[in-house]
Image (spheres, rainbow, N blue to C red):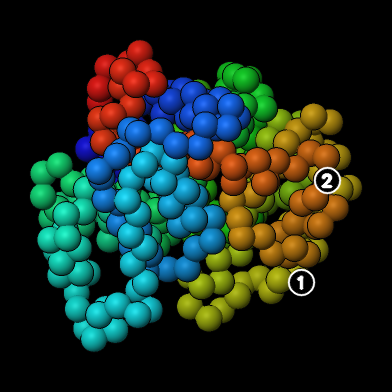
Amino acid sequence: LRHLLTTEGLPAAMIRRILDTAEQFVSVNEREVKKLPLLRGKSIFNVFFENSTRTRTTFEIAAKRLSADVINLNIGASSTAKGESLLDTVYNLQAMDADMFVVRHAQSGAPHLIAKHVKPGVAVINAGDGRHAHPTQGLLDVYTIRHYKKDFSGLSVAIVGDVLHSRVARSQIHALKTLGVPDLRVIGPRTLIPADVERLGVTVHHDLATGLKGCDVVIALRLQSERMNGALLPSAGEFFKAYGLTAERLALAKPDAIVMHPGPMNRGVEIDSHVADGRQSVILPQVTFGIAVRMAVMSILAGSAAGALTDGPAA
Ligand code: CP
């Protein structure tokens, strides 16, 4: 694995290797071993052209736990504001001996462009590009599902909300299909479900009650208003009325169903607080697992997880 740009086409064996490596990091963290030397001497550059709370911070924590040096580029205070191009920014950071770039950008494909132009040996991780992909989020979500449900075969998973603008949903769908989830549903209004999504092997529901029936996993998604060009369709109130995840609606899923959300949440829009904070919610464990999954991805890309933590061959 040279770069991690998408979960589309990522082989099942590689996904399992990332999950298994992350599991070992979780158990290392539980033993309160805070630092491992796997990325000692490496420089990781976090380059976020869009806001982030979870992804940027957990990448930083993950890199520090692997003993890497972490540089967070402050885009607002960078020379991007003076007209410097994306690639010139990257070339200049590369001249500062970057080993890995973690990139978030509003334009779909920006991390792919960077990956095409970096020097051999420099890795690029997509931390979310436009509405295209957010592979480490997809991977931490499948990690969370495996943690609570053990096995993907026989699972019914429902993704509810703004699938159209969601890079997270796309990354989840590719990873879950590759791992063999037999019943994958997307639920939302016609305006927020991509017209061709069924070709990815999902079933489409426009009625929330029908879609939630008997599910093992319910994933709520935020309305991505920043990608709607100013028109929030439907309105937040209309959306909650038809698709908001309330305790009453969640009762249609299996009694032991887990509730997930990639964050940031808009309470009272896609999810009610009773559900977000309720006994079935695993929303905060998702965030914690994100550290171990990002440690796994970075160490595998650096070629340093093999041998040190896994029995598998170097990718
Ligand atoms: N899930 C996610 O990408 O959250 P942030 O935007 O806070 O990174």
The residue at 74%/49% (across/down) is: 208
Residue 196 appearing in the image: no
| Farthest residue, direction bottom | 82
The residue at 73%/36% (across/down) is: 258
| Viewer-closest of 66 and 81 | 66
The residue carrying pointer 1 sits among few (fewer than 14), some (14 to 19) or many (20 or more) residues within 10 Å by Cα, namely few
Could you tell me which secondary element the residue under label 1 belongs to? helix
Q: Say whether mark 1 is within 8 Å of ligand 1.
A: no
| Viewer-closest of 221 and 96 | 96
Image position, residue 274 (x, y; %): 85, 53
Report the amino acid beneath label 2: Gly
Image position, residue 110 (x, y; %): 27, 61
Is residue 277 left or right of 304 when viewed as pictured?
Answer: right
**Residue at which label 1 appears:** 237
Residue 294: image quadrant is: top left
Which numbered disc, 1 or 2, marks the residue closer to the eye?
2
Could you tell me which secondary element the residue under label 2 belongs to? loop
**Residue at which label 2 appears:** 278
The residue at 65%/41% (across/down) is: 285
